[in-house]
Amino acid sequence: MELHERILELAVSRSFFFPANEPYGTTGGFYDYGPVGVLIKRKIENLWRRRFIYENGFHEMESAIVTPEQVLVASGHVASFADPVVDCKMCKARIRADTLVEKEVKGWKWDGKVESITSAIKEHGVKCPGCKTGGDGALGKAYMFNLMFKTAIGGDHSSAYCRPETAQGIFTAFPRIFRNHGAKLPLAVGQVGKSFRNEISPRKGLVRMREFTQMELEYFFNPGKQGIEGFETVAGKELRMQVDGKTSEMSVRNISEQGIAANEIMAYFLALEWNFYIACGVDQKRMYFRVLGKTEVPHYSKGNIDLEVETSYGIVETIGNAYRTDFDLSQHAKTSGQDLSVFVEEEKKKLIPHVFEASMGVDRMFFCILEHCFREKEAPKSKTEDPKPGAAKDWEWFDFPPAIAPYDVAVFPLMKKDGLAEKAEEITAKLRSTLGAFYQESGSIGRRYARADEIGIPYALTIDYDTLKDETVTIRYRNDGKQERIKINELEGLIRKNIEAGRVRLE
Ligand code: GAP
């Protein structure tokens, strides 16, 4: 079984995530986060807020999802946010055309022209794969299919779309946020929210979805000033960079000075992203930044760098960094007829700010974390430590950094009787005022440890007969099953301190 199949199985059975609307059969590309997964997802999002927004003194917003057509005409999405598709003349299935031909015709690569796909289909006799009619699977002409979900607003049925990226809402809100918040550049605005893309063939679980969450940051700056405050704090940091297919370690300073990144601003955010990914549990040996080649960079961009992560599906792009220049604001100014330039006091002139964008998908990152944090080995033999006494040999757990574990701590009374459950409930209630505590009183203690390990809780407390005598509990560590005694009145402070330090054993 491939790792991603195993992860999907575990995700469904442990309430990380599962297909949406299950009783009605599943619709590809839509997933629900369950009670465990949603805790992790929120922690990832909140850590992003802390590291990218609050620690830099930036702003956060929440823009509307349903977006009037004009906005997305201006941004270019109505005209060109599309993938090539082809319909089967027999079973009417709509198929992603470039990937179909690439799969069927060895060595064929799409040149970006839809006509080339139609020619290749004819020339090589490409047919509908798995045509359900039993017919010959003849395909029609390839055409471009817009990936946005269309809707109509209210009584006048004016056209609108579910946003395909959270960024456009930030661009259209920029003039107001600029006026209301100091009227000075640089100014950065981020948001966490859903984006929608009607992917032809959503695949690979959380990797290609139709509804997904993005964490996007738009950094508006004076194009004459491409430096950033705080750069020196990260300048010496080494990152893995892939340039023209070659991967090497480079300092953030060199990435900026050698023009690998479009400017110092982009290099600064690469360092933040690198640190953020490590803090969330992605293995730094299995990730790198790839500098996109000239033909891959969108027409409005002066440079793109993606973060790519190795998974059992292959390489997955999880972050897109782009120097979007003044493209979006200029387009919105033109289309709306509004002046979106800002007055720069020091230079006594008006200009349209340039934008650096860091765009991350939460779901892809979540999937990478699950794969990279998954651990399994033979269960320890001792009765109290064996997480699955008498059950499967394997001991499996998620080695999440404590900062993103679904719960900070698990609390288990050794027995339900003799006042142990009451004492455990009392301790849980206290801890819950500042920590996420998982409580369970039924089942063998080994099974309860196993349940906590399976969802990646770093520490488990056992309340036993000694607790009633000396106000101490046993703390057991997820990663090695080791145990020690801790005083109840020190628990909360110790756990909080160690979560902050990212330690899986209390110090
Ligand atoms: N505003 C720029 C933008 O949206 P993108 O490269 O299209 O750029 C950024 O998307 C990130 O959003 C990706 O790196 C990925 O993490 C996530 N993403 C994009 N499409 C996705 C999909 N269909 N399913 C899951 N995540 C997706």
Image: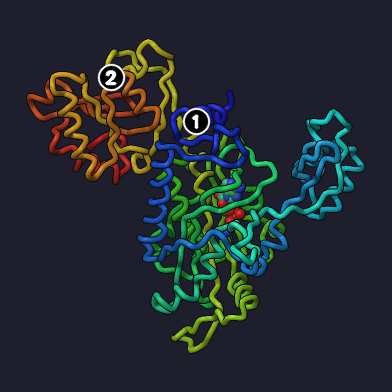
Image position, residue 21 (x, y; %): 55, 37
Residue drawn at 42 percent across, 53 percent down: 48
Q: Is mark 2 on a helix, strand or loop?
A: helix
Q: How many labels does the image show?
A: 2
Whether residue 503 is situated above or below residue 188 in the rendered picture: above
Cβ of mark 2 under 8 Å from ligand 1: the answer is no
Q: Disc 2 vs disc 1: which is toward the camera?
A: 1
Q: What residue type is labelled 2?
A: Ile
Mark 1 residue CB less than 8 A from any atom of ligand 1:
no
Label 1 neighbour load within 10 Å: few <14, some 14-19, many 20+: some
Q: Which disc number belongs to residue 445?
A: 2
Q: Is residue 360 above or below residue 327?
A: above
Q: Which of 385 and 307 is in front in this view?
A: 385
Write down the quadrant of residue 451 in the picture.
Answer: top left
Q: In which quarter of the image is the C terminus?
A: top left
Residue to which mark 1 is pinned: 12
Determine contact: label 2, label 1, CB under 8 Å. Answer: no
Residue extending farthest to the front is: 155
**Tag 1 secondary structure:** helix
Q: How far apart are marks 2 and 1 (CA)?
A: 24 Å
Tell me the tag on residue 385.
none
Q: Would you identify the image quadrant in which residue 484 lies? A: top left
Left or right: 213, with 96 as reference point: left
Q: Where is residue 186 in the image (x, y as percent from the top left)?
A: 45, 73
Q: Can residue 249 be seen in this view?
A: no
Q: Which residue is drawn at 80% across and 45% down?
A: 86
Q: In this view, does 422 lie above or below 216?
A: above
Q: In the picture, which quadrant includes the N terminus?
A: top right
- Mark 2 crowdedness (10 Å alpha carbons): few <14, some 14-19, many ≥20: many
